[in-house]
Amino acid sequence: MVLSALGLALATCGLQNREVPPEDRFTKIYNNPSFDNITAIDFKQTNDGGYVILGSISREGSNDLRIPYLLKVGPTGETEWDSNLIPEFANYTSPVAKLKVEGTDYTFFCARQGQLVLVRVRETNRRPEVIRTLVSANARPYYAETLPEGGFLILANQPNCQSAGPGTQLIKTDAALNPSFDQCYPGISLSSPLFNQTSDEFAYAGSFTLNGRQVFYFNAWYRNDLSLLFIDATSGAVIKEYTLADPVSQAKTLFSGLEPLGGNRFASAFANGATVFLNAQASLLNADPAQDTRLGALGAPFHELRPEKRVHIRRIQAAGREVVAMAASARNNQIALFLFQPGTNNLRGRAYFGSTNPYVPNGLIQTADGGLAIIGTTTVASRFARIVLIKLSATDLANLANQCQALGLCN
């Protein structure tokens, strides 16, 4: 199904709605004749200019048991194949981002019989195969970041961490998928027994270098708040945890997105109570804690955003410059896209995508043609979750990044 909502949103935001090749700009919803819920998790562009999308299927009457789902589409978004009728996928549950693509091999983490496994699907046979089992004892995967040097950084919930009860397991593998870091943190959990927050929405991990040493970070429940923890990649020690709870309003902090920009600079999304704050110039992990960005005023408030959904943040190129792209869920059921100048809170442009049904972003990537693609989840018939893929052309993205010029707001 091709929707006109993208063109309407672009026109509303001052982007040119000119004639473009069909692969440069489109919005597609992938419907399905079943009564199952199919949601997006992550996606990557493939060598043929198309996309492979990782999602999950919740079968009708299965108590929300999530089965991995792969969807391969062409450069213009047309479906080429999916895994819906491949029976072997029913042996796996709880698939998580990030999807890794190497040629026509697609790999992702999920669970099988209480084990955390890395599954590969080859384009040639489209059947899942386990290529590595990393941890057992009923660990549940929540996130697996692909690392620039190869390998993964995996975040999992461990029910018996160091024989001390539930905790968070953080594992790094090398390019050959051998674990080079494996640490469990008791008392730091990926699911909260006290607050009704969907852990999957906010679980993420990453890696960066600070003052010559590698640092990991992940988001988890710590002291009854969803906290951002920084970990020494050599010792495994917690360097610092950032959390905030307002004792008056009982508002809880939710670190809903983070992107390292180099040194002590970060682009971040942060929700406190009912308000979402976006910041492309947060400063954290300073030797003098007084120089850290004060969490109570972390960025500018964006009241139109939903605090119960994660904000996806990526550095991309637009109009010949680096920008920070943030995709968030708006209260009007659309996907809100913001472009910031890195290291500042200068908003260069914004756009909204979607229609009357709720649209929720699940990830964004820069495409090979210099455009931008967003994967998300929407609903059809006011009930059934389906995957939506939004593609912007390089011209659309450049116009969006220069929107501040037309408004006289560029710095």
Image: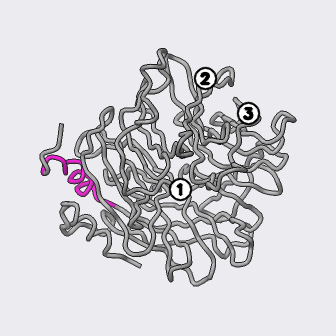
Q: Which residue is mark 3?
A: 185
- Residue, disc 1: 42
Identify the secondary structure beneath mark 1: strand
Q: Position of residue 239 (x, y in %)?
A: 61, 23
The image shows residue 115, relative to residue 218, as above or below, that is below
Query: Mostly what secondary structure, the magenta segment?
Result: helix
Q: For residue 238, what is the image quadrant? A: top right
Which part of the image, by quadrant, shows the C terminus? top left
Compare residues 112 and 361 and report the one nearer the observer: 361
Residue 197 sits in quarter: bottom right
**In the figure, is residue 300 to the left or right of 190?**
left
Residue at 72%, 35% in the rendered image: 178
State which mark lies toward you, 1 or 3: 3
Residue depicted at 25% across the width and 57% down the height: 396
Mark with earlier residue (1, 2): 1
Between 400 and 164, the residue placed more toward the observer is 164
Q: Is residue 379 left or right of residue 335?
A: right
Quick check: is 403 in the magenta stretch? yes
- Answer with left or right where residue 64 lies relative to residue 14: right
Q: Amino acid at mark 2?
A: Ile
Q: Magenta span covers which residues?
A: 392-406
Q: Is residue 125 magenta?
A: no
Q: 268 above or below 28?
A: above
